Amino acid sequence: MGVHAEQRVLPHSRDKIFDMVADVGRYPEFLPWCLAARIREKTDDHLVADLVIGFKMVRERFTSRVHLRRPEEIHVEYVEGPLRYLNNRWIFTDHPDGTLVDFSVDYEFRSRVLQNLIGGLFHQAYKKIVSAFEKRADALYTVESRAVELSVRSGSD
């Protein structure tokens, strides 16, 4: 069993951060160890996705139902794969400096072998994952805000 929680303030709007986290199909572009993503089903308030995660010799696929409550919360409900359970929650709150992101995950592997092999690394892995989301937001939205700033400057000349 493992638990990880952390909070970060990101200098971007709550809507943008929500959209980035909800865009599960793009996870392989920036998340460490995420090798593939497939969206099976998608509506305005949920999606069902398969992710393939690989680390060294281990490669596992798991399926999750992702509940989207725009723009406040994303809750990941584990459906199938190598875990006994997974509860993952993202809460987005307006903050004077952008958005307060509250991330938490609680999980347990089905296999004792996987738990012993990977379990000890998960805390560090989740720190890397949260950091990857932060870097992705900066890459997507800092460039966008600079382009708007340049456009405003050039329009006022």
Image (cartoon, helix red, strand yellow):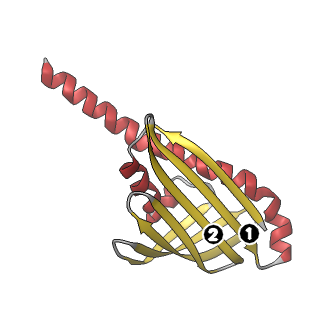
Residue 122, x across and y down, in percent = 74, 58
The image quarter containing residue 126 is bottom right
Instruction: Give me the C-alpha separation between circle 2 and circle 1.
Output: 22 Å
Residue occupied by mark 1: 58
Look at the image and tell me whether residue 56 can be seen: no
Q: Amino acid at mark 1?
A: Val
Q: Residue at x 40, y 48 (%)?
A: 14
- Going by the numbered disc 2, the residue's amino acid type is Asn
Residue at x-position 70% and y-position 56% = 4
The residue that appears at 73% across and 51% down in the rendered structure is 124
Which corner quadrant holds the C terminus? top left
Depth check, front residue: 27 or 96 = 96
Q: Residue at x 75, y 72 (%)?
A: 108
In front: label 2 or label 1: 2
Residue at disc 2, secondary structure: strand
Q: In the rendering, at what x and y percent does residue 98 appear?
A: 43, 39
Whether residue 68 appears in this view of the structure is: yes
